[in-house]
Amino acid sequence: MKGFFLLALLAHLIADFVLQPAAVNNRKEQGKISGFLLHGLVILSLTFLAVHWYGLLTAFLYGVLVTALHLLIDLGKFLAGRRTKPGTELFLFIADQLLHLAVVFFCLRLFAPVAPDPEVLGFYSRIFPGETIPALAAGGPGADWAEKMVSKGLQVAVIYTATLFGGAILIQKTLQWLTGKISPADGRLGKAVGILERLILLTLVAAESLPALGFILAAKSIARYQELNNRDFAEYYLVGTLASFSLAFFAGLWLRAILKM
């Protein structure tokens, strides 16, 4: 059941943060049905692919229910956010993600079987080399080890996806709440820089290379040296950098603990 939850959670994170283009998100924010339908199609497809290891019918029914509830939550967020202040957007984002997490968990209680479908695993064991899938399909003592390795790998993927991509939106909305404005650094290039920054920081913390963190922050500050003369930009930059660093740092500690288990 833990593997089912991690797979469904990873599908949600990828659908919401990685495979939701700005054009689709803008359509949703404008209340256009096409935006909701396109997003729902991505959620349904990813959820089905993620959990189809537990049976095709189970994956389809679970995917339909999760998608329907996900779109209802998104619609509620749209209706609640039409007349909001910048700070409310941050609250709505956090509430929205908590509700999506609750949907993934409670739907799991209705559909998740105890173990993956042997027929599905048997099919993939004939296609992909290695020992993990055959061990899961065969069951027995080897299945426990294989399940542990798969679970650990999924937890790593969830942490990286949430920190890199979900963190980008969380930090952006936090900065908008604190400053009441959108900085030019919030564009595509600034977002990419933030993702790469958290990728490096998270990995360094997980690898226990803490002294290297100072070099990363120093290099970023040098690149922005001239702009730091502007007090408004300096405050915006400092808050954004500290928020991104803190998120990556604690996620790295969590990842390190998982890898040591």
Image (spheres, grey):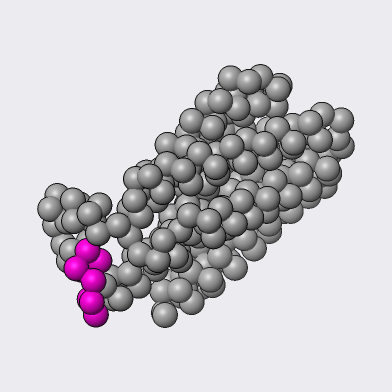
- Residue depicted at x 70% and y 27%: 29
Location of residue 139 by image quarter: bottom left
Location of residue 56 by image quarter: top left
User: x and y percent of residue 198 in the render?
Assistant: 53, 55
User: Above or below — where is 79 with respect to 237?
Assistant: above
- Is residue 8 in sight in this rendering? yes
Task: State the residue at coordinates (46%, 43%).
Answer: 61
Q: Residue at x 67, y 36 (%)?
A: 72
Quarter of the image containing the N terminus? bottom left
Q: Please say if 14 is above or below 22.
A: below
**Range of the magenta residues?**
135-142
Residue 134 percent across, percent down from the top left: 18, 63
State the residue in front, 21 or 132: 132
Taking the image as shown, residue 23 lies to the left or right of residue 56, namely right
Residue 43 is situated, as x and y percent measured from the top left of the image, at: 50, 38
**Vertical relation: 40 (above or below) 8:** above
Q: Main secondary structure of the magenta part?
A: helix
Picture residue at 52% right of the left edge, 46% below the top: 12
Labels in figure, total: 0
Residue 157 lies, in percent from the top left, at 43, 57
Q: Left or right of 152: which side holds 177?
A: right
In terms of image quadrants, where is residue 156? bottom left
Is the residue 72 above or below the residue 167 in the image? above
Q: Which one is nearer the viewer's eye here, 237 or 143?
A: 143
Work out whether residue 160 can be spotted.
no
